[in-house]
Amino acid sequence: MMDDTGARIARRIRLERDARGWSLADLAERSGVSKATISKIEREETSPTAVILVRLAGAFDLTLAGLLLRAEGGGERLSRAVDQPVWRDPETGYLRKQVFSRPDHPLEVAQIELPAGRRVVLPASSYAHIRQVIWVQVGELVIQEGGERHVLGAGDCLGFGPPSEVTFANETTTACTYLVVLSRG
């Protein structure tokens, strides 16, 4: 059984697909996610991972934050801590708190907690229409971007280059917390 956030995400994916008149096959082709997986997500039988959500959001020409914001129905100028949506990746335990995102504002801010020993690999397509900066708050984060490996400690900040597959890895024994600041366009 999904939690409320997972159920809202599942409904939003179906709404986004329906609004475009896309079949499951259409969304599968555009996102690279199998029809069976999309169907299970929409029927609330499984929770999507971060990678799957990024692929689905990209197919809809949305950022992950944009898809999550639509699922939550938010969009106020003031983003109170208590109202900031939180989503946990069922595969890695990656925790994403959407600090700020509005459809009419070019900037988004998310706080990520990546558990010890975990990694998330995101496709180049997820960076096609955004510019992004990562700012580590606590712990250490390894970012493999294209052919470059960056090790960031608390306070370090990395601006991403051209779109490429990116791996976020926590190779330590304690959780890492970092901020993602991105602009669309």
Image (cartoon, rainbow, N blue to C red):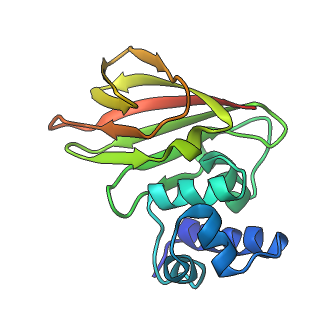
Residue at the image point whose x is 35% and y is 28% from the top = 147
Q: Measured from the top left, where is residue 6 in percent x and y?
A: 54, 69
Query: Which of the image's four quarters has the C terminus?
Result: top right
Q: Nearer the viewer, residue 61 or 4?
A: 61
- Residue 102 is drawn in which quadrant? top right
Question: Does any portion of residue 115 appear in the rendered image?
Answer: yes
Name the residue rendered at 52%, 68% in the picture. 33
- Please tell me in which quadrant of the rendered image residue 116 appears: top left
**Quarter holding the N terminus?**
bottom left
Residue positioned 71% across, 58% down in the render: 60
User: Compared to 84, does 170 lie above or below?
Assistant: above
Instruction: Establish if 154 lies above or below 63.
Output: above
- Of residues 34 and 91, the one nearer the viewer is 34
In the depicted view, which residue is nearer to us: 20 or 1?
A: 20
Q: Percent position (x, y) of residue 97? A: 52, 44
- Residue 86 pos. (x, y %): 52, 52
Residue 112, picture quadrant: top left
Asked whether residue 81 is in view, the answer is no
| Percent of width and height locating residue 8 | 64, 69
Left or right relative to 44: residue 140? left
Tell me: residue 54, above or below residue 158: below
Q: Along the horizontal axis of the image, is 53 left or right of 182?
A: left
Residue projecting furthest to the left: 173
Q: With 53 as the anchor, is 22 left or right in this view?
A: right
Q: How many marks on residues?
A: 0
